[in-house]
Image: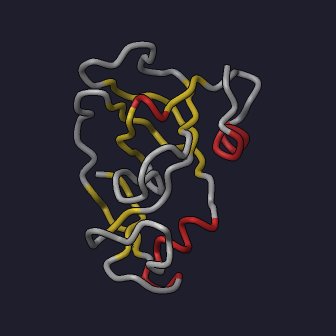
């Protein structure tokens, strides 16, 4: 279980809930990360209030697609990432697909870049710093 920010209905910040959610194992092309920092963007507020270019498809929904953390596990068909590796998650997926406002998250490997040792998690989440 991981504490995860979700929302059961669309609306303002008051709809956000911190819930314990099972994380599971990464599937093909996916990676599970320990999230150390997230990027907070206007897009998340628009998505939460259902004013984003993509409507919310299913509730409860998760938020966030920009983060930095450390790889915990890799799924089948993932190359180039290993457990313990520092990474940044780039905002390349639909807000309906994945969410990183959580202690741990499953993300597509295609959204990851290695994070250089010189970039802390906050910097990595903000800029997607690459090694």
What colouring method underlies this structural image? secondary structure
Left or right side of 129 for 14: left
Q: Quick check: 59 above or below 107? A: below
Q: Position of residue 42 (x, y in %)?
A: 63, 67
Q: Which residue is nearer to you in this view: 45 or 73?
A: 45
Q: Quadrant of residue 110?
A: top left
Q: Position of residue 14 (x, y in %)?
A: 49, 86
Q: Which residue is drawn at 43% across and 83% down?
A: 15
Left or right side of 110 for 24: left
Q: In which quarter of the image is residue 131?
A: top right
Task: Give the residue at the far top of this rendering.
Answer: 80
Task: Give the residue at the far right of this rendering.
Answer: 118
What is the total number of numbered labels drawn onto the structure image?
Answer: 0
Q: Residue at x 48, y 57 (%)?
A: 101
Q: Quick check: 74 above or below 62? A: above
Q: Which residue is nearer to you in this view: 101 or 46?
A: 46
Left or right side of 57 for 68: right
Q: Where is residue 20 in the image (x, y as percent from the top left)?
A: 31, 61
Task: Give the residue at the far front of this rendering.
Answer: 53
Q: Where is residue 65 in the image (x, y as percent from the top left)?
A: 50, 50
Q: Quick check: 23 above or below 101? A: above
Q: Which residue is drawn at 58% across and 51% down?
A: 38
Q: In which quarter of the image is residue 79?
A: top left
Q: Residue at x 58, y 35 (%)?
A: 88
Q: Quick check: 5 above or below 119? A: below
């Amino acid at each position: 279980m991981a504490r995860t920010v979700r929302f059961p209905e669309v609306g303002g910040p008051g709809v956000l809930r911190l819930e314990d959610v099972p994380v599971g194992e990464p599937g093909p092309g996916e990676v599970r990360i320990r999230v150390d920092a997230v990027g907070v963007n206007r897009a998340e507020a628009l998505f939460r209030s259902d004013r984003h270019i993509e409507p919310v498809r299913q509730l409860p929904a998760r938020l966030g697609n920009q983060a930095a953390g450390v790889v915990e596990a890799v799924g089948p068909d993932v190359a180039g990432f290993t457990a313990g590796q520092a990474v940044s998650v780039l905002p390349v997926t639909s807000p309906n697909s994945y969410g990183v406002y959580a202690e741990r998250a499953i993300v597509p490997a295609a959204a990851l870049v290695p994070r250089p040792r010189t970039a802390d998690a906050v910097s990595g989440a903000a800029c997607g710093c690459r090694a």
